[in-house]
Amino acid sequence: MDTNTLLLRFDGRSRLLLRSLLSGATGARRGLWVFQRQRRSDPDRCLHTCLETLCQQEICLNSDAQTLTTKPLVCLFPVAFQRSLVSFLHLTHPLHPRTSVLRLLDCLSQGEHAPNPWVSALVVQLRRDLGAPGGKEPLITPQCRERLRGLCERLRGSSGGGNDKATGWALCLGGPIEPQLSSSSQSGLDVVPQRKRKSSCVDLDSEPEDNAGQQRKRMKTSLSPVDTERSCSSMGYVVGTEGLKDEVETDRVDCVIPEPAVEPQPAAGSPSDALPENVKASIPQIKEILESEMEWDQSSVDVFKVLNDCDPSQVEILCRMLSLSEMPEQTLPQLCSCLLELSPDLSHSTAATLIKSLLLGKVLFLSEPASRCLVTAVTSLCSRYPRPTCHALIRPVLEEGQIGSAQAELLNRLIEDCLDPHYRLLVFQMTIKGIWCEGLLSVIHALLDKKLELNEELFTLFTDQLSSQAPHFTKSMKYAKMMLTVLTKYNTHVTVAHKHTLSCCLSSNETFLKKSLQAALKRIKHS
């Protein structure tokens, strides 16, 4: 079953959270950011309804036996989603009903096929955190243990040393595995100071190292995310309990926190290699500014001047590295204010890339009226960069085909307050394609109210589209009101051919405005 179909079982806010968990390796972090935003607007929010929906039984096809069977809804999602979901709950479970979380873990553990080993390990670890039955099971399978031992032997064999003393991975795997991986254990590694354990991902061997060993060290260090410690420390604030903060800062099966002083070396062929040196040097400063809660000053504006040194592909890479699509909405007005103060103005392609990264995802996923911060950001950028906004924001929203009332309200505001007549005409041309919906009718009506300068060819295309879409809106008041606007404000554009087309449109109308529309059409005279 398609993932988008599964997401339709949930309300808008839960759907947004679950979609963020589908973001691959960064799913848990993105889900945590979305949940933090939702908790700011609703401090009492928990995921009871969402978790219960994930546990509901769904009818599906058993691919082996070709028969119908039932599975929990969560088991129909990809394995990557299940991993992100359990990692997310590992950090936020104090905020959710314990019974709902345990029921979800039971659903993930059941099934006729062996569950994914990684998901199973995360489920067992979460059971340990909750003090629930099943938490004493081993975190890794015997097969996984053997593969780790084999990996250990290869690592020792490649070190080039002749010392038979067990060190590094060999020392870690030499004793019982399960107690070492449990935060509640009192054996082995637990008596080692926490600080030393954190740095163990770098100091794997006590033997002297040659150049190859140094290179392996750098590669191992680069495997840890740069901002793991920063994101983990912020999770304690999200959940709001000191106990959880302490838990996040301890060792994880799936997350080893590096020493703050260790700077990872960029991997060969990484996206940052395509950026100019001055742009790469400014990335830490930009991140610091974006994460700062202080008021931005002129020095903040100067940092963003590097955008004028990038071509479109480099701007896109920079936006991904800065995670601009995930930026909190309350930061948008300050950032947009800095962008508007840049001199010279951004190029069309640079502005379009920034607008797409910053705003498109937020506008597409609107399920309620846009916040004041989002409206401020969209209107300010649209006023300065109208053409990039039309191509990078308005066009994709129109092409999505499912414009809700929230998107329609925001687009109508741009039409009313920000766009000049020729840009309104550009947006109007974008609407005369594809399938219409009720939200799009509101946008078209708002455009027509502005008395657009339509030539005969464009008006003919519009009337043809009116005719083709008429059967879908026989009872739509929005369609009827839009038709009334066409017949009253654009009557001078109507030719004999147009009149025949419009008459066909009205014949299928079933609203109480039908007689008014037919009367307006009859009043149109031709010379």
Image (cartoon, grey):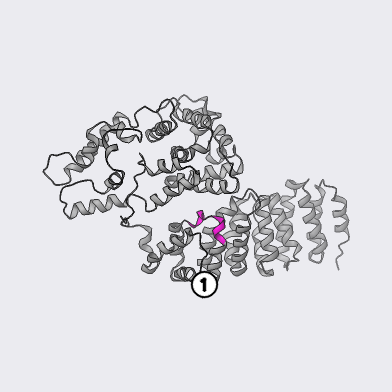
Q: Look at 44% across and 68% down and name the residue there.
A: 310
The residue positioned farthest toward the bottom in the image shown:
344
Local crowd size for mark 1, using a 10 Å CA cut-off: few (<14), some (14–19), many (≥20): some
| SS assignment for the magenta stretch, majority | helix
Seen from the viewer's position, the closer of residues 8 and 306 is: 306
Please name the amino acid that badge 1 sits on. Leu
Q: Please indicate whether residue 356 sits to the left or right of residue 161 in the image.
A: right
Quarter of the image for the C terminus: give it: bottom right
The location of residue 476, given as percent across then percent down, is 77, 48
> Magenta segment, which residues?
323-332
Among the 4 quarters of the image, the one containing residue 419: bottom right
Q: Residue at x 63, y 63 (%)?
A: 379
The answer to whether one can see residue 401 in this image is: yes
Residue found at the far left of this picture: 162
SS of the residue at dot 1? Answer: loop
Q: Is residue 501 visible?
A: no
In depth, the one of 369 and 39 nearer the eye is: 39
Query: Residue at position x 59%, y 65% from top?
Result: 381
Give residue 398's quadrant in the image: bottom right
Residue 128 spot, x, y in % from top left: 40, 31
Q: Position of residue 233 (x, y in %)?
A: 42, 48
Q: In this view, does 27 lie above or below 298?
A: above
Q: Does the magenta stretch include residue 61?
A: no
Q: Name the residue under label 1.
A: 342
Left or right, 366 with respect to 162, comes to right
Which residue shows up at 85% across the image and 54% down it?
517
